[in-house]
Image (tube, helix red, strand yellow):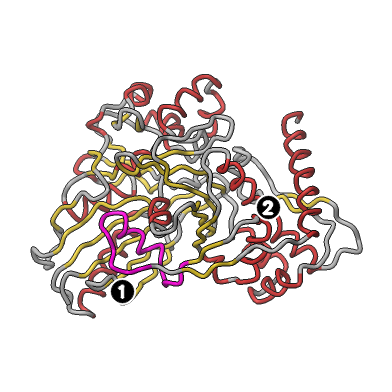
């Protein structure tokens, strides 16, 4: 086979390598789960050596299996990671992901005016996901010989020989000025860093020859973009839409023509390329909420589907902040809670309250995004799309039609779409919303519970 495309998509828990033919039809997809992770209430680290081994072995497996002679390798990675490097790009420790909560002390010590100024310069929310705050607390490790890397630039360097990062991941680092389109001088000065300690920023279609042993001269590496950009560009032919990703976490995003920033909402706005920005809000709590209730109540996926379809009446309200929270709360210390419990509630009604808690938390962020950019429909990707009754419930809660790509691994094709036009037309299954008067009543209870929670937090 010749002129194929390998798409590498690296998240915080899994690595996917997809092989597409010349017509952009999916030939095979490999998924590898990261095992050497270090996760505590505060830490969330991944092992970059393990990731690189998976990248190389996965590419080799597909190349030999299909006798690939030439092609492109497109990189897509999760945002907000940090990998410290010593001389000659030797790794210093493991890779910190966005979910790592280090940086909370630095964040709490910065004044409101300084936070707002930083936010408006960088487009990155003031939260521990923001690498800047982690780096503040790591100042004693950032000597002159130390380089500040991330998942994207480390992988690109090992495949191409050049230490570079794409502009969309640079823009999500909290160290990039979205107006000047360069590393933010004020941030570097505060950290005592020079630009030489950071990778070169390249456009998302930047391409270099592949430098892997025994691969030959007919393979190229394209630096690519972030997972958020990839998800949105999957829906390039869907106008007037916001894109909702519901995996472990959730995020709702649009592509805007200018930075759209609102300090009271704390949304992000990251550069994609000239005249395009990824604007939206992200939550820590998506389908992880469903996984939690499965483990706690020993529920199978088919039972979750059954409950979502039956919609039993419930007085219980579940605030789903199991993993702390980004939008809508911006409180990494947030915790989940049940309200309105009575002895007459059934097991199914509690499970339903948990599912509704996830859905109404998503709605908070969808409504916030509507304050910035108008849209009438929502494209949906992520593992939740495999649960039709939950998807219908989500459509009914949001009150907007949901468009689900019919193409398998469509969000992976978005990685390719980010750097060049694709040959495949993506069609959708449309899930229209229905009015459910019980959901209207439940939304009022959810809002009251959320307002009471926030009031108690302020007073406590």
Indicate which disc, 2 or 1, sits on the residue closer to the N terminus.
1
Left or right: where 213 falls relative to 29: left
Which quadrant is the C terminus positioned in? Answer: top right
Q: Which mark is residue 360?
A: 2
Q: Is residue 115 left or right of residue 188?
A: right
Dots 2, 1 in contact, CB < 8 A: no
The kind of secondary structure element at disc 2 is: helix
* Residue sticking out furthest to the left: 217
- Front-lying residue, 149 or 389: 389
Q: Residue at x 29, y 64 (%)?
A: 422
For disc 1, the marked residue is 25
Residue appearing at x 13%, y 73% in the figure: 69
Image position, residue 63 (x, y; %): 21, 74
Q: How many marks?
A: 2
Above or below, 51 relative to 348:
above
Which residue sits at x=66%, y=42%? 334
Q: Splitting the image into 4 quarters, where does residue 456 fall?
A: top right
> Circle 1: is it few (<14), some (14-19), or many (20+) Cα within 10 Å?
some
Foreground residue among 30 and 95: 30
- In magenta, the rendered stretch is 405-425
**Quick one: quadrant of the N terminus?**
bottom left
Is residue 418 on the magenta stretch?
yes
Q: Residues within 10 Å of mark 2 (few under 14, many from 20)?
A: many
Q: Position of residue 259 (x, y in %)?
A: 42, 35
Q: Is residue 66 magenta?
A: no
Q: Nearer the viewer, residue 2 or 36?
A: 2
Residue 416 - label: none
Label 2 to label 1, Cα distance in Å? Answer: 36 Å
Image quadrant where residue 168 sits: top left
Q: Secondary structure at mark 1?
A: loop
Look at the picture and state if 137 lies above or below 397. above
């Amino acid at each position: 086979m010749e002129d194929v495309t390998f798409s590498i998509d690296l998240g915080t828990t899994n690595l996917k390598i997809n092989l597409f033919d010349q017509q952009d039809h999916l030939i095979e997809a490999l998924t590898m789960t990261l095992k050497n992770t270090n996760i505590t209430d505060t830490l969330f680290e991944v092992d970059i050596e393990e990731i690189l081994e998976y990248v190389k072995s996965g590419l080799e497996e597909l190349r030999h299996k299909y006798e690939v002679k030439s092609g492109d390798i497109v990189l897509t990675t999760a945002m907000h990671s940090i990998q410290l490097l010593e001389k000659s790009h030797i790794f210093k420790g493991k890779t910190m992901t966005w979910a790592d909560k280090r940086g909370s002390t630095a964040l709490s010590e910065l004044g409101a005016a300084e936070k707002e100024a930083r936010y408006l310069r960088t487009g990155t929310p003031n939260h521990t996901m923001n690498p800047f705050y982690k780096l503040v607390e790591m100042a004693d490790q950032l000597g002159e010989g130390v380089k500040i890397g991330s998942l994207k630039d480390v992988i690109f360097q090992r495949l191409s020989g050049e230490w570079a990062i794409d502009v969309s991941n640079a823009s999500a680092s909290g160290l990039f000025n979205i107006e000047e389109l360069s590393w933010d001088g004020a941030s570097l000065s505060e950290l005592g860093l020079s630009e030489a300690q950071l990778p070169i920023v390249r456009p998302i279609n930047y391409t270099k020859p592949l430098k892997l042993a025994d691969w030959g001269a007919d393979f190229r590496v394209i630096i690519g973009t972030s997972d958020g950009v990839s998800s949105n560009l999957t829906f390039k032919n869907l106008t007037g839409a916001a894109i909702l990703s519901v995996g472990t976490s959730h995020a709702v995003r649009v592509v805007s023509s200018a930075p759209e920033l609102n300090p009271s909402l704390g949304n992000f706005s990251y550069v994609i390329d000239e005249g395009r920005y990824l604007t939206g809000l992200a939550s820590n709590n998506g389908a992880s909420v469903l996984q939690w209730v499965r483990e706690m109540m020993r529920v199978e996926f088919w039972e979750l589907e059954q409950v979502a379809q039956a919609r039993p009446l419930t007085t219980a309200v579940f605030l789903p902040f199991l993993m702390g929270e980004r939008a809508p709360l911006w409180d990494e210390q947030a915790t989940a809670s049940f309200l309105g419990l009575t002895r007459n509630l059934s097991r199914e009604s509690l499970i339903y309250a948990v599912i509704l808690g996830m859905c109404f938390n998503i709605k908070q962020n969808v409504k916030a995004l509507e304050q910035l950019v108008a849209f009438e429909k929502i494209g949906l990707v992520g593992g939740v799309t495999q649960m039709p009754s939950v998807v219908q419930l989500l459509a009914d809660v949001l009150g907007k039609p949901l468009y689900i790509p019919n193409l398998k691994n469509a969000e992976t094709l978005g990685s390719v779409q980010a750097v060049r036009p694709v040959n495949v037309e993506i069609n959708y299954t449309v899930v229209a919303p229905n009015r459910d008067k019980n959901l209207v009543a439940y939304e009022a209870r959810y809002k009251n519970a959320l307002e009471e929670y926030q009031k108690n937090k302020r007073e406590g």
